[in-house]
Image (cartoon, helix red, strand yellow):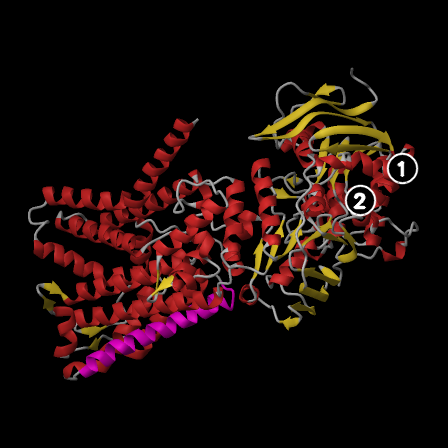
Amino acid sequence: MTNSDSILEMINVSKTFPGVKALDQVNLTIRKGSIHALMGENGAGKSTLMKILYGLYTPDEGGEILFDGQPFTPKVPIDAIRTGLAMVPQEISPSGNLSVAANFFLGRELRKGFLMDHQAMNKETAKVLDELGIPMKVETLMQDVSVAKAQLLAIATAVSYDAKLIIMDEPTTALTESEVQQLYKIVRKVQERGISIIYISHKLGEVFELSDEVSVIRDGEYIGTKQTSDITKEELINMMVGREMDEMFERERVEIGETLLEVNNLSLPGKFEDISFDVKKGEVFGIAGLVGAGRSEVVEAIFGYKAAQSGDIYLHGKRVEIYKPMDAIKQRIGFVTEDRKLTGLMLNMSVTDNMIMPELGPYIQSGLISDELASHVAEDMKKQLRIKTPTVDTIIDNLSGGNQQKVLIARWLLLEPEVLILDEPTKGIDVGAKAEIYKLIVELARLGKAIIIVSSEMLELLSLSDRIMVMAEGREIGIVDREQATQEVILEMAAGGEVPSEQTIDTSDLRIEGVA
Amino acid sequence: MDSLANKRLAKTNYTEFLNKYGMLIILVLLFVALSLKIDGFASVRNVLSILEQVSMFGIIAIGVTFAIVTGGIDLSGGSIVALASVVGASIVTGSEGYGMTIFAFGAALFVGSVCGLINGSITAYGRIPPFIATLGMMTMARGMAQLFSDGRPVDASSDAFTSIGDGTVFGIPGLVIIYVLVAVVCHVMMSRMTFGRHVFAIGGNVKTARICGVNVEITLVKVYVLAGALAGLAGAMLASRAYAGNPTFGNMWELDAIAAAVIGGTSLAGGVGSVGMCIVGALIIGVMNKGLNMMGVDPYWQQIIKGMIIISAVLLDAQKRKKA
């Protein structure tokens, strides 16, 4: 089985979380000295796979991992690093108050006696950066260094650990086009040193530009590996999508009425530009795009959580001013946020309190909140949405993810919204709860609500939406009708905006940031 | 499967019960133990004396509880007591009748509210951590008290004014009555009014609170104004009890107040707490102080024991949160 040609072999590796099989019998072989792209939709299991390799998760029994021909069972990241596997995470978090060289040597500082040997560290850092062609001054403070440069430094750091395999997790997410080109150049230099690279990416253009081989994971399953030169874009998309159309469920269609919400040229520089669309009564309007495309930012702006800088919002044809959530609530707009824990739940409060918070007015009797009345209303909602909780006074932290999500939806239903925005409404919840939430969305559409859904789950969007707006890098790529929307079309629109247009690298652009 | 779920539920109920009433049980046990050990500890006179001592820092503790529930803190209470006491005393000194007394109490409340307004504004709009904002106020209010009184005690000999601190109604000391009234009003505010619900929402998850349309800034300002006003009230109470205002009054009271809130189960992480449990916390401190005094325990040791109890209470809170 062992192949001396390969730096990494994963054989039948699985990972089960309570209730979820995140990885199912994955086989992956990385050839020595190759750039190996790893693709898959959000939640396909890429991160889980990488976390296993980096010693953050322990895989299930029964699989095997070989690194350079030797069994490989990292318990903590340092095991992986010592064996020769380094990771460049998606989001770099360097110590901003330390210099470039200090970050480079963080945790393995060179010393002379009891003191740190700054001179030696600066010299060594400069040497590695120079070899890789990364233009950066070693004494610059990290906080004055751009994200792109920090990324390059992380790669250099990985190289200096004598890594044989470097995993890069979507390294271009936060980079501009010219920075991306620079990154490609460095990645190829790293490859020239005989180091293998696993390059995780969503972006088709990138994969074809850079990689020698490409593997696809879907729903935790290994789909296959191809030579990048042997495969077309369409074939790759098919590998990623894979599902047959009959797996989509056919939802009941309801009558679509007049325009309810209209958004015109909404912009928030750095996040999204020039977004325009409308949503009609009874319509489910989907917003698709890759992570970081600016989808959540657009709906947050509509709700006034992080208001847009320019553009107009109309309700029933009348311009409304929404600068803060209270403004949106007054206009009967509801917003189920993407991150339940971060912006949704008040974890140590009761189910009832979590439900009634946006509008306490209806529960006030002679100046005081009537907990009895609130519980009563919450009890109704509990029945209506079949929320599984011992009582409505239970602390919400004790509920399962799906039931917590139902409480959050109930929160905004109590507001009797005209517009309901749902950002990733089924993230991290089980299949049964998902189906119920889908049913609920259709029911709300029937009642004439305008519904906006942001989702990374393609099937969910395709099944539910009447129209889908696709975004990429903060721009509106287009709006497609239900009849024309397929996974292929949307994926291509979402990724298509990315194909690198200029192949030439302008080295004059490689300025050094943060030098006065 | 069902019995497992029931068992888990039963366990949740059990821990919930302990979380809710654990400190009350400890208070009762502490009181019973001290009553058995010390003659006359359980006498009416002694109990009223404990209540009277508790009433002043207990009122500050109620304000501090509001601040802690939002996830903040208020360190300025003790210094506001000093400032309010000298301001109140200077108004009533040599005066007769209840008019000036009411004016003095009003002025004390006002001075405290202004200090709280500054605390709250700096915290909410200046985005300075309340620890720092109120630490600054702690120093400033003490300095203002010294400046206002020239560093000397201010006589507060007015029969009307001192009758508040000395007098009793149906045998119950005036200060205790004020404490009870404040507690009832604050309890209703915290548990039954929109303001209180918003205080919990901010402490529970400030981002969610914003999304739910809570005006976080204004709510925070209100919380610190309330805490300041209650500390001012405590200052006037102390002046009427001591027949004088004094810029050294209230030294370290903010710590007793915080201790009372924390011992009562107010979580320093925010989102959890109640006026009732804050009173229990204050009573634990009061009963312990009195008991240790009557047993003749070295005051130095008393401080050490008090410190250990505060740390235990916070450890317990951290433990609870880890399990959640």
Disc 1 and disc 2 in contact, CB within 8 angstroms: no
Q: Marks 1 and 2: same chain?
A: yes
Secondary element type, mark 2: loop
Q: Amino acid at mark 1?
A: Thr
Q: Report the span colored magenta.
A: B99-128
Answer with left or right where residue A216 lies relative to residue B16: right
Residue A412 disc label? none
Instruction: Please indicate, yes or no, whether residue A118 appears anywhere in the rendered image.
Output: no
Name above or below for residue B231 compared with residue B290: below
Judging depth in this view, the residue of B311 and A490 nearest the camera is: A490
In this rendering, the label closer to the viewer, 1 or 2: 1
Q: Residue at x 62, y 20 (%)?
A: A61
Give the image location of residue A207, x and y in percent. Answer: 84, 40
Query: Residue at (82%, 57%) from the top-left corner?
Result: A511
Q: Residue at x 54, y 46 (%)?
A: A405
* Quadrant into which the N terminus of chain B falls: top left
Q: Main secondary structure of the magenta part?
A: helix
User: Can you identify the residue that label 2 sits on?
Assistant: A203
The residue that mark 1 highlights is: A232
| Image coordinates for residue A455, horizontal then vertical, percent | 67, 47
Image quadrant holding the C terminus of chain B, namely top left
